[in-house]
Image (tube, grey):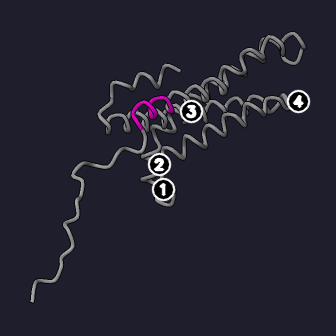
Amino acid sequence: MGQPPTDPPVHRPTHQRAPLASSWTIALAGMLALSTAMGIGRFAFTPLLPMMLHDGVIDLNAASWLASTNYLGYLVGALLCTFQPTLWRRFQALPPVISTYAVRCGLVATCALTLGMSLNVPAAWPALRFAAGVASAFVFIYTSGWCLAQLAEQGASHLGGVMYAG
């Protein structure tokens, strides 16, 4: 009797699987995230100020304070991102920060807080501008970290500047 039939050898590719997103897609996603956070969180409010001043909703002093609270929010947000690893080591019960989740939440918060400026509650506006600054800083820092790490992993660090072109 002859040998039993054997299965033909299975061909297994030796190359690595394709990346989930191209380098350009990653760079453009970073650019859009930063454009949204900075454009809506900061610059969408600026063109409204002359109309608010003209309508007497606020005066120049109040407008300056609103801008300042937004800048203070940027500073506090950046500092929180800087101290985040230390805080998470100290308070073990805190869940880990996932960059993409932080970016998504920050983008939603930035848009919602800017939309909150349409409420006719001037006493809440400084808090809204401050919180929008914090959210924008989170988006800026976590988007930069995620995007640059992804580009470096794909050997496309040279596209890092595209992210900041928005």
- Which of the two marks, 1 or 4, is nearer to us in this view? 4
The magenta span reads: 22-29
Amino acid found under the numbered disc labelled 4: Asn
Residue 28 painted magenta: yes
Which residue does the numbered mark 2 point to in the structure image?
87
Amino acid found under the numbered disc labelled 1: Phe
Q: Which image quadrant for residue 38?
A: top right
- The span from disc 4 to disc 2 (Cα, nearest Å) is 37 Å
| SS for dot 2 | helix
Residue 120 marker? 4
Residue 44 marker? none
Which residue does the numbered mark 3 point to in the structure image?
76
Amino acid found under the numbered disc labelled 3: Val
Question: Residue, x 49% and y 49% (percent of image)?
Answer: 97
Q: Position of residue 149 (x, y in %)?
A: 37, 37
| SS for dot 3 | helix
Which residue does the numbered mark 1 point to in the structure image?
91
Q: Residues within 10 Å of mark 4 (few under 14, many from 20)?
A: few
The quadrant of the picture occupied by the N terminus is bottom left
Amino acid found under the numbered disc labelled 2: Leu
Q: Earlier along the polypeptide chain: callout 1 or callout 4? A: 1
Helix, strand or loop for the magenta stretch, by majority: helix
Q: Position of residue 161 (x, y in %)?
A: 41, 22
Does residue 75 appear in the picture of this structure?
no
